[in-house]
């Protein structure tokens, strides 16, 4: 059986721990009802793309050359767009931006195009040479984002003089025609 410590050892111990502070009790935090998460507001153009016409990003293939046209776009108009014959009204350069910043810039740019009544614009996304694994991240995102926008009738990779596969020409819906359709409908 162990011997109890003598009085001098107890005094030494008390002296050694004299400046120690008592630790607080660790109890679990009392239950509190957490507030519901605030929903993220989706852009208006995404709410239009619901139902069978909705498009997931996985469904969109991103090759070297981009080409997209909505049904009803005339072949001659699409050919002129591909050849770079349509005058480019405005241009947006997304080089080096993060994906979220690039999306905001593209949204603001397309809204500005509608205000300025632009018909053909250029969006420079780059070729992705500085991206991980040299994959063009913004090119694939721009390809997807433009397909979701109702005001985009067609887009294709630009000619070599305007950036080649690092840029796209975008044909936008005629704002006057859309206004006439709303008034008559």
Image: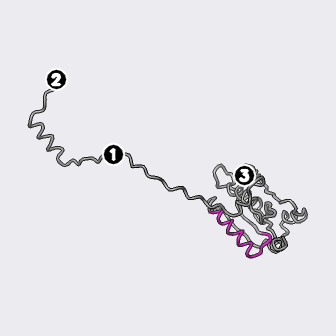
Q: Calculate the distance from the C-alpha at mark 2 to the C-alpha at mark 3.
A: 76 Å
**Quadrant of the drawing holding the C terminus:** bottom right
Please give the label number shown on residue 142.
none
Give the labeled residue for mark 3: 56
Label 1: which secondary element = loop
Q: Calculate the distance from the C-alpha at mark 2 to the C-alpha at mark 1.
A: 34 Å
Name the foreground residue: 60 vs 84. 60
In the rendered view, does 59 fall on the left or right side of 71? left
- Mark 3 burial class by Cα count in 10 Å: few <14, some 14-19, many 20+: few
Where does the image place residue 64, in percent across and percent down from the top left?
Answer: 77, 53
Disc 3, disc 1: CB below 8 Å? no
27 within the magenta span: no
Q: Residue extending furthest left?
A: 7
Give the labeled residue for mark 1: 26
In the rendered view, does 141 fall on the left or right side of 176? left
115 within the magenta span: yes
- Mark 1 burial class by Cα count in 10 Å: few <14, some 14-19, many 20+: few
The residue positioned 69% from the left and 69% from the top of the image is 109
Name the foreground residue: 68 vs 27. 27
**Quadrant of the drawing holding the N terminus:** top left
Where does the image place residue 43, in percent across and percent down from the top left?
Answer: 67, 63
Give the labeled residue for mark 2: 1
Label 2: which secondary element = loop
- Specify start and end residues of the magenta stretch as a single range: 101-120
- Earlier-in-chain disc, 2 versus 1: 2
- Earlier-in-chain disc, 3 versus 1: 1
> How many discs mark residues in the rendered view?
3
């Amino acid at each position: 059986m162990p011997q109890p410590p003598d009085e001098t050892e107890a005094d030494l111990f008390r002296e050694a721990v004299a400046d120690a502070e008592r630790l607080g009790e660790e109890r679990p935090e009392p239950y509190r009802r957490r507030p519901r998460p605030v929903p993220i507001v989706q852009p208006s153009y995404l709410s239009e793309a619901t139902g069978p016409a909705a498009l997931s990003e996985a469904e969109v293939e991103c090759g070297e050359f981009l080409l997209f046209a909505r049904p009803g776009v005339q072949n001659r108009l699409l050919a002129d767009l591909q050849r770079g014959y349509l005058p480019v009204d405005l241009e947006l350069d997304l080089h080096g931006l993060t994906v979220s910043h690039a999306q905001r810039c593209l949204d603001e740019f397309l809204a500005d195009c509608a205000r300025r009544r632009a018909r053909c614009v250029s969006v420079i996304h780059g070729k992705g040479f500085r991206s991980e694994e040299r994959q063009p991240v913004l090119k694939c995102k721009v390809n997807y984002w433009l397909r979701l926008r109702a005001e985009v009738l067609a887009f294709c990779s630009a000619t070599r003089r305007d950036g080649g596969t690092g840029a796209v020409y975008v044909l936008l819906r005629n704002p006057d025609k859309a206004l006439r359709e709303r008034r008559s409908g």
